[in-house]
Image (tube, grey):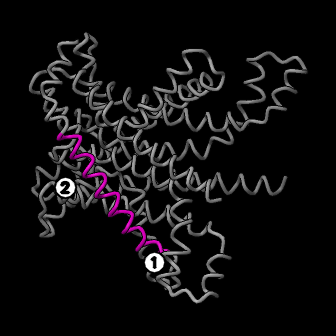
C-alpha cells in the first residue's frame, strides 16, 4: 500500500465518521419524539409508531438502503447516495433510539410528574425541566451503545457508492491484487472508533453507579 | 403499483428460496455460534491467565469490527493466506465466528449472574462435572439468557443480509435480482422487508414463550 492509499483510507474514515455523526445527531431527537408519541399514547399515531419501530428493528440496513436508493427515484424523488445513506441511518437509528428513550420514560417516577403538576408547571415546561434531564441521564448508556452499533453497520453504505473506509479498502485491494493489507488497515481504523464508544458507555455506567452509591 | 406486486408474485419462487437461504444461514450459524460460545465462555472465565486473555482479546476485537468488514476479510482476505473458500462457506464461517464472540459475552454475563447455591448443592450431591453442567448449570442459564440470545439471533438474521455483497443468494440478494430484472424496486424490497419482519416476529414469539416458561419455573 502506498502513501496515497493510506490517505484514501483516512478520507474514507472521515466520511464514515461524518455520516455516523449526522445520523446520530438527527436520529437522537427523532427517536425521542417517537418515544414521546408512544408514551403519551396519542391515538392512532402511537400505534403507527409501534409498527414502524417493530419493522425498522427487523429490517437489515442493506435492504432499507437499497429500498430507499432505488424506489424513491421511481416515485419521482431524486436522491443521491449520500442523502440515501443518511436517510437510511436516521430511519434505522431513530427506531432503536425510540426504544431506549421509551424504556426510561416508562420507568420515570410518576410522583415527580404529579409534583410538577401541582406547582402549576405547564406540560412543555414539565417535560423540559423535570422529565428530560432525568431520562437523558438514564438513557445515555443505551444511546451510546446504539451509536457503536450504528458505526458497525455503516460499511453497508458502500453498496450505493458512498466511499467510506470499507469501500476505500476494497478498491485498493482490487487495484493492488492484495486485499488483505487494506482490509486490516480498515480494521485498525474502525476498532478505535467503536472501542472509544464502548469505553465511553462503560465509563458513564460506572460513574452513574458511583453517583447512586454516594446519594 | 399493484402490477409491480404482481411481478414480484410471479417471481415468488426466487424470493422464497432467498427466504429459505436466509433462514438456513441464520439457524445454522446461530446454533454453531451458541455452541462455540459455550466453549469460549469457560475459557473467558478461566483462571489460566493466558487463555482468558487470548479469548478476551478475540471477543473484544470482534465486538469492535463491523460484520461486513469481517465477511470481506474471510472472503477476499483469507485467499492471500492460502485459504480459499466459496461464498457459502465464507458466509457461514463469518457469521458463526463473529457471533460466537457475542454469544460468549452474553453467556458469561448470564453465568456470573447465576446464584452459587444450587451449583454448590449439586457438587455436594456428588454430580459429576458433565451432569452438573447439564442438569444444574445449563437450564437456568439458558432461561436467563434466552431474551438476549433471541436479540442476537435477530442480529444474525440482519447480518446475513450483508452477505448479499459476496453474492450469496439470500433474501436481499433475491430482492435485488428481481428489481434489476424487472425494475420494480419498491415492490421487491418492501416485500423483502416484510419477510424479514415476519422472521423476526417468529423469533420474538419464541423468546416470549421461553420467558413464560422461565416465569412458570420461578
- Left or right, A91 with respect to B92, comes to right
Q: Which residues are magenta?
A: B17-44
- Left or right, A87 with respect to A110, comes to left
- Measured as percent of width and height from the top left, residue A43 is found at 60, 15
- Can you name the residue that lies furthest to the right here? A119
Image mark for residue A44: none
Q: Magenta: predominant secondary structure element?
A: helix
Q: Secondary structure at mark 2?
A: loop
Identify which residue is drawn at 60% across, 47% down.
A141
Q: Quadrant of residue B15?
A: top left
Which image quadrant: the N terminus of chain A? bottom left
Q: Secondary structure at mark 1?
A: helix
Mark 2, other Cα within 10 Å: few <14 / some 14–19 / many ≥20: few
Whether the magenta-drawn stretch holds residue B167 is answered as no
Q: Which residue in the structure is indicated by mark 2? A: A2
Image mark for residue B43: 1
Identify which residue is drawn at 27% across, 27% down.
B191
Residue B161 is at least partly visible in this image = yes
Amino acid at each position: 500500500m502506498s502513501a496515497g492509499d493510506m490517505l484514501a483510507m483516512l478520507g474514507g474514515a472521515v466520511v464514515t465518521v461524518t455520516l455516523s455523526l449526522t445520523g446520530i445527531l438527527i436520529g437522537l431527537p427523532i427517536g425521542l419524539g417517537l418515544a414521546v408519541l408512544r408514551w403519551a399514547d396519542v391515538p392512532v399515531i402511537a400505534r403507527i409508531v409501534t409498527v414502524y419501530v417493530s419493522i425498522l428493528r427487523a429490517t437489515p440496513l442493506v435492504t432499507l438502503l437499497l429500498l430507499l436508493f432505488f424506489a424513491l427515484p421511481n416515485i419521482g424523488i431524486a436522491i443521491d447516495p449520500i442523502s440515501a445513506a443518511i436517510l437510511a441511518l436516521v430511519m434505522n437509528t431513530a427506531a432503536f433510539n425510540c426504544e431506549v428513550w421509551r424504556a426510561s420514560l416508562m420507568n420515570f417516577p410518576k410522583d415527580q410528574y404529579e409534583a410538577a403538576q401541582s406547582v402549576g408547571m405547564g406540560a412543555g415546561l414539565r417535560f423540559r425541566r423535570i422529565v428530560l434531564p432525568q431520562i437523558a441521564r438514564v438513557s445515555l448508556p443505551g444511546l451510546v451503545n446504539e451509536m457503536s452499533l450504528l458505526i458497525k453497520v455503516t460499511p453497508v453504505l458502500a453498496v450505493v457508492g458512498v466511499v467510506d473506509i470499507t469501500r476505500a479498502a476494497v478498491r485498493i485491494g482490487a487495484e493492488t491484487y492484495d486485499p488483505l493489507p487494506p482490509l486490516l488497515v480498515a480494521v485498525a481504523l474502525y476498532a478505535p472508533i467503536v472501542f472509544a464508544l464502548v469505553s465511553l458507555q462503560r465509563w458513564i455506567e460506572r460513574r452513574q453507579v458511583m453517583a447512586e452509591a454516594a446519594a | 403499483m399493484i402490477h409491480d406486486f404482481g411481478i414480484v408474485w410471479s417471481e415468488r419462487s426466487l424470493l422464497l428460496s432467498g427466504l429459505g437461504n436466509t433462514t438456513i444461514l441464520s439457524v445454522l450459524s446461530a446454533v454453531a455460534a451458541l455452541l462455540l460460545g459455550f466453549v469460549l465462555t469457560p475459557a473467558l472465565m478461566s483462571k489460566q491467565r493466558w487463555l482468558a486473555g487470548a479469548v478476551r482479546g478475540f471477543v473484544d476485537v470482534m465486538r469492535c469490527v463491523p460484520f461486513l468488514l469481517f465477511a470481506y476479510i474471510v472472503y477476499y482476505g483469507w485467499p492471500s493466506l492460502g485459504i480459499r473458500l466459496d461464498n457459502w462457506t465464507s458466509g457461514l464461517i463469518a457469521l458463526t465466528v463473529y457471533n460466537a464472540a457475542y454469544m460468549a459475552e452474553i453467556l458469561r454475563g448470564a453465568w456470573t449472574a447465576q446464584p452459587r447455591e444450587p451449583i454448590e448443592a449439586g457438587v455436594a450431591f456428588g454430580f459429576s462435572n458433565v451432569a452438573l453442567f447439564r442438569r444444574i448449570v445449563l437450564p437456568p442459564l439458558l432461561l436467563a439468557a434466552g431474551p438476549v440470545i433471541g436479540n442476537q439471533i435477530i442480529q444474525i438474521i440482519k447480518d446475513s443480509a450483508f452477505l448479499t455483497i459476496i453474492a450469496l443468494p439470500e433474501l436481499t440478494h433475491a430482492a435485488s435480482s428481481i428489481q434489476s430484472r424487472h425494475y420494480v424496486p419498491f415492490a421487491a424490497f418492501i416485500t423483502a422487508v416484510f419477510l424479514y419482519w415476519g422472521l423476526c416476529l417468529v423469533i420474538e414469539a419464541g423468546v416470549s414463550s421461553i420467558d413464560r416458561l422461565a416465569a412458570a419455573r420461578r
